[in-house]
Image (cartoon, grey):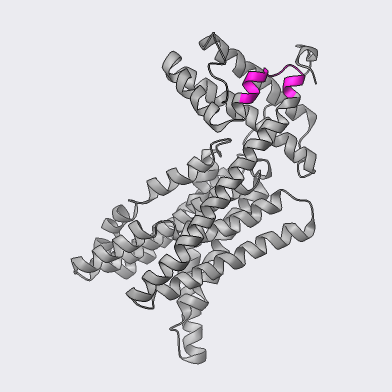
């Protein structure tokens, strides 16, 4: 649809609105589950241990979340969805794990009289299923915000970080209750400094599976990919728990021989998914160059991670924060258009032409704002 042919008199569809009907009950459920989870932890370790543990467990949260968000530079996920993902892990999944793990231990104790393997045989299944349900809910409820593997990784990692946060409160609270500083230091180093990516890494396997499912129409792939991801998550989690209970020497060996390579592989998958998204943006924006919505230099810039970064940096240098914000909004809208065309091509989207037109109008308005703030736009081209 050429830009010149869009009539000003054409009816303007209403902007897509964030569904509000579930906002209040969702927040309520998260708050209730969060209070119950913290109460359960406080009952075990005492309020004097739980409160300081809340602060100590927060130390790795910021850096880990910042690393995850770095992967999602093309189309940043809506903050309210990221908040839900973190809240699901910290509040809902953690509460479910506290209840189900304890119940499973009691059942095993009555059935076989031995619960020593609960952390290896039961907890990984319970916890990864609960965490994965949060990512699945996001996929089902916010289908248009879930574009593929990168989104699956980001949402899953946020769920995992939230879960790890509450779990760390429990373990740090126990260490504080022992009145042994050396024990507290060991727990803090192992859980907050050495392995802050453990839970996010496990759940990322589920996120990759759901991301692949979101990109395909085949029922086999839509079911098989998430199930395979869940199996990988459970196995990794079980191996991690087994190494943690096998002594310091075995833990270090498995950490170096298994967890470090798995982490490196996860990073490689995430970076490869980012490269694929860059190519996708480059391919699908060309139609908007041909129809006059974008200049060739703009499309080149939008299809380059370094070009996008330089554009924002130069915009900030020349026009301050308003210009940098305008460029960021322009880039994100263009990326949404590219991802939308990709979903339409694959037949995994129910978007309408009117929604594309609305995005194009928004892109045009944002482009005009950028040009108004930066007369020599585009400031840089991709190299």
Horizontal side of 179 relative to 101 (left or right) equals left
Magenta stretch, residue numbers:
288-300
Quadrant in which residue 176 is drawn: bottom left
Q: Is residue 161 magenta?
A: no
Q: Residue at x 69, y 26 (%)?
A: 359
Q: In which quadrant is the N terminus drawn? A: top right
Q: Residue 83: in sight, yes or no?
A: yes
Percent from the top left, x then y, of residue 56?
29, 55
Where is residue 248 shown, x and y percent of the image?
A: 33, 74
In-front residue for pair 62/271:
271
Residue drawn at the location 70% of the way across and 50% of the way down:
214
Left or right of 220 in this view: 134: left
Nearer to me, 264 or 367: 264
Q: Does residue 358 appear left or right of residue 248 in this picture? A: right
Residue 13 can be seen in this image: no
**What count of labels does the image hold?**
0
What is the residue that sits farthest to the bottom in this orientation? 112
The secondary structure that dominates the magenta segment is helix
Residue occupying image coordinates x 46% and y 87%: 109
Q: Is residue 278 left or right of residue 223?
A: left
**Toward which corner of the image does residue 301 lie, by quadrant?**
top right
Q: Please tell me whether residue 327 is drawn above or below residue 183 in the rendered image.
A: above
Q: Measured from the top left, where is residue 57 in percent x and y?
A: 33, 56
Name the residue at 48% across, 50% down: 86
Q: Quadrant of the C terminus?
A: top right
Of 217 and 141, nearer the camera is: 217
């Amino acid at each position: 649809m050429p830009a010149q042919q869009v009539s000003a008199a054409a009816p303007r569809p209403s902007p897509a609105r964030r569904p509000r009907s579930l906002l209040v009950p969702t927040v309520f459920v998260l708050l209730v589950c969060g209070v119950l989870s913290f109460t359960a932890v406080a009952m075990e370790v005492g309020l004097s241990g739980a409160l300081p543990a809340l602060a100590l467990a927060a130390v790795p949260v910021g850096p880990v979340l910042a690393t995850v968000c770095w992967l999602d530079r093309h189309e940043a996920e809506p903050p309210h969805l990221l908040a839900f993902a973190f809240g699901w892990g910290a509040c809902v999944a953690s509460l479910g794990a506290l209840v189900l793990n304890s119940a499973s231990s009691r059942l095993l104790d009555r059935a076989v009289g031995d619960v020593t393997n609960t952390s290896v045989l039961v907890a990984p299944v319970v916890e990864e299923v609960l965490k994965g349900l949060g990512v699945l809910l996001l996929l089902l409820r916010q289908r248009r915000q879930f574009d593929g593997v990168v989104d699956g990784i980001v949402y899953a990692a946020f769920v995992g970080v939230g879960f790890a946060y509450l779990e760390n409160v429990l373990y740090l609270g126990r260490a504080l209750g022992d009145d042994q500083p050396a024990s507290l230091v060991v727990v803090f180093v192992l859980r907050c400094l050495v392995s802050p990516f453990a839970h996010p890494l496990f759940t990322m396997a589920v996120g990759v599976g759901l991301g692949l499912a979101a990109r395909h129409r085949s029922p086999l792939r839509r079911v098989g990919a998430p199930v395979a991801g869940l199996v990988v998550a459970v196995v990794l989690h079980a191996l991690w728990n087994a190494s943690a209970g096998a002594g310091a020497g075995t833990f270090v060996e498995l950490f170096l021989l298994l967890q470090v390579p798995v982490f490196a592989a996860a990073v490689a998958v995430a970076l490869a998914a980012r490269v694929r998204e860059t190519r996708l943006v480059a391919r699908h924006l060309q139609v908007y160059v041909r129809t006059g919505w974008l200049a060739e230099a703009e499309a080149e810039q939008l299809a380059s991670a370094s070009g996008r970064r330089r554009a924002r940096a130069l915009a900030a240098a020349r026009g301050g924060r308003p210009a940098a914000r305008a460029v960021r909004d322009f880039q994100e809208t263009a990326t949404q258009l590219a991802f939308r065309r990709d979903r339409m091509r694959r037949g995994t989207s129910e978007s309408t032409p009117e929604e594309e037109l609305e995005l194009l109008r928004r892109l045009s308005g944002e482009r005009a704002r950028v040009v108004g703030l930066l007369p020599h736009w585009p400031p840089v081209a991709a190299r």
